[in-house]
Image (tube, helix red, strand yellow):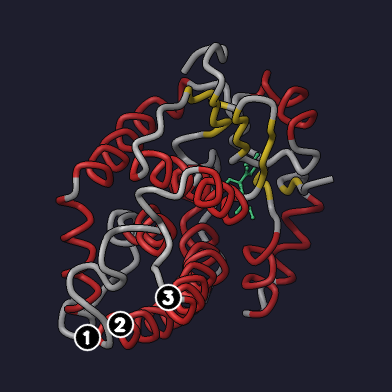
Amino acid sequence: MTQATLSRVLYTSWISTFARKVALGLELKGLSYEAVDALQSDFGPELERLNPRREVPVLRDGELLVVNSSDILQYLEWRYPQPPLYPASIEERVAARALERLADQRLDPIVVDCTLWRWTERSDQPPPGLLSAGQRDLDITLTRLQTELEQRAKPWPFGTPGLVECAWFPNLIAVRPLGLQIDAERFPTVLNWLAAMRAHPVFATDRKRTAVFMKTLASNNYERTRVFWSGERLEWLLARGFHEWFADEIRAGRAAFPD
Ligand SMILES: N[C@@H](CCC(=O)N[C@@H](CS)C(=O)NCC(=O)O)C(=O)O
């Protein structure tokens, strides 16, 4: 990634599931963009100017800045309606948004909170009970997803890959490599959907790009001792009773927050 010269710029990081969600949307729409790695430590002040929460993704499209993955995908749909990311009917749009939220607010927190030992620099172990709580809630989430998928077309529940696939793919593809399980007997429909996404060129490119990026993580200029906590990632952790562990993290200076 380089300094931005194109008029459409995605401030991103290939480790960020929310930024990948937006990159997938841009690529499904066939929109070219320049990718700037905005989680490099020395980009911090500039990222804060673009988004006071210091989060990626941020999209600059000409003069317009849009932050937050859902807002960015909605913006892209308004500005560049074809090919659509959203289903045609209002009822299906409501269903697609609900599934997007399930990925953003439940799948993402479970995967991120349970796996940070894999991508941050630390030598301790997860607190007792964290991984089993994560697996239990993941199974509940996958049950909800599978029920929705079974009521719809296969392999693409809303006809063509769009909003829902953008939201689910980056985390769902990481579940097994990061040590959580997707039980093949309980969740065959979920796994068939995931296989269809893996085989699609846009999603295959995303997966490879992140795999390459992860190999360079240790040599990148990333903050890897303090974890950035926000939104539902925090909510899930506290709701499952890991507040004492989290207080220790704050006391040890290992937690950072949005302003
Ligand atoms: N609600 C936001 C969440 C974005 C978010 O959590 N971004 C994370 C990466 S996935 C981030 O930029 N964290 C800052 C950091 O890690 O320094 C969205 O949907 O865009």
Task: Point out which mark residue 89 bears.
Answer: 3
Which kind of residue does numbered mark 2 sit on? Gln
- Ligand 1 within 8 Å of disc 3? The answer is no
In depth, the one of 36 and 98 nearer the eye is 98
Is disc 1 placed on a helix, strand or loop?
Answer: loop
> Comparing marks 2 and 3, which lies closer to the viewer?
3
Which residue appears at 40% of the width and 33% of the height? 31
Which residue appears at 60% of the width and 24% of the height? 40
Q: State the separation of the CA atoms marked 2 and 1.
A: 9 Å
Circles 2 and 1, Cβ within 8 Å, touching? The answer is yes
Q: Position of residue 33 (x, y in %)?
A: 46, 26
* Sooner in the amino-acid sequence: mark 2 or mark 1: 2
**Residue holding disc 2:** 146
Q: Position of residue 102 (x, y in %)?
A: 50, 73
Is disc 3 placed on a helix, strand or loop?
Answer: loop
Which kind of residue does numbered mark 3 sit on? Ser
Left or right of 157? Residue 117 is right
Circles 3 and 1, Cβ within 8 Å, touching? The answer is no
In depth, the one of 7 and 205 nearer the eye is 7
Label 1: few (<14), some (14–19) or many (≥20) C-alpha neighbours in 10 Å = few
Is disc 2 placed on a helix, strand or loop?
Answer: helix
Q: Is residue 169 above or below residue 89?
A: above
Q: State the separation of the CA atoms marked 3 and 1.
A: 30 Å
**Residue holding disc 1:** 186
Q: State the separation of the CA atoms marked 2 and 3.
A: 21 Å
* Sooner in the amino-acid sequence: mark 3 or mark 1: 3
